[in-house]
Image: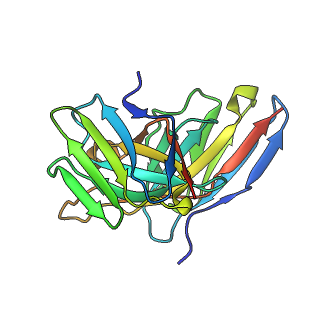
Amino acid sequence: GAGVSQTPSNKVTEKGKYVELRCDPISGHTALYWYRQSLGQGPEFLIYFQGTGAADDSGLPNDRFFAVRPEGSVSTLKIQRTERGDSAVYLCASSRLPGLAGGSTDTQYFGPGTRLTVL
Amino acid sequence: QQQVKQSPQSLIVQKGGISIINCAYENTAFDYFPWYQQFPGKGPALLIAIRPDVSEKKEGRFTISFNKSAKQFSLHIMDSQPGDSATYFCAASRGWEYGNKLVFGAGTILRVKS
């Protein structure tokens, strides 16, 4: 089946502009994550959705960043008043939730990312 | 505070050799330790994962060794191939009670010379 898709693959913007990055998770995956990967670094957690609600947004760097997932599927990461330091690859991942009987941690499947460049 | 420390930053191995990448963690509440492989322009892909109730897990040419008392775990790639050349990340999470969010190491760039 289809994996996690992200659009656009590349986004170049000017400092101060607003951008939206989109993530289409794997069908049926309730959990959705956004991570940010700076050059030469590992991904860093931004926000986690369980269904439609943001269950954990502790990784968002400041109030210029926010994300939505209104119907529990597609998610959009929104960045206001972009700064040069926001330049990075933004990764989305999705996974199933454990079953009602409890269960082990599940695999996160990553999309190819959106490379954001702020000039 | 870097919760997961990974070494080395880069590694060159001859074809057929063994690649070894090490990670150390600080938070004893972590209970899931995956390794991800990332090729240029692609997202990370799960390679193999382990939970702390076992000391070793093997899948094909890939083995995780886990030392709970030392808070360390490592990835061994046996019979390394040029196609294994990629960036490898270790990670850790505290499980679903905390959203299963992953904390990643800084990555190791592996190059396998043919």
Is residue B86 positioned above or below B109 on the image? below
As rendered, which of B54 and B65 lies closer to the eye?
Answer: B65
As rendered, which of A55 and B46 lies closer to the eye?
Answer: B46
Residue at horizontal 24 percent and vertical 58 percent from the top: B57
Residue at horizontal 17 percent and vertical 64 percent from the top: A101
Residue A19 coordinates in the image, percent (x, y): 75, 42
- Tell me the quadrant of the picture where the C terminus of chain A can be found: top right
Residue A112 coordinates in the image, percent (x, y): 62, 57
Q: How many badges with numbers are in the image?
A: 0
Residue B32 coordinates in the image, percent (x, y): 28, 48
Residue at horizontal 38 percent and vertical 45 percent from the top: B20
Return the residue found at the far top.
Answer: B1
Which of the 4 image quadrants contains residue A86?
Answer: top right
Let me know if residue A18 appears in the view.
no
Return the residue found at the far bottom.
Answer: A1
Is residue B21 positioned above or below A92 on the image? above
Residue at horizontal 81 percent and vertical 29 percent from the top: A16
Looking at the image, residue A98 sits to the left or right of residue B7; the answer is left
Looking at the image, residue B51 sits to the left or right of residue B43; the answer is left
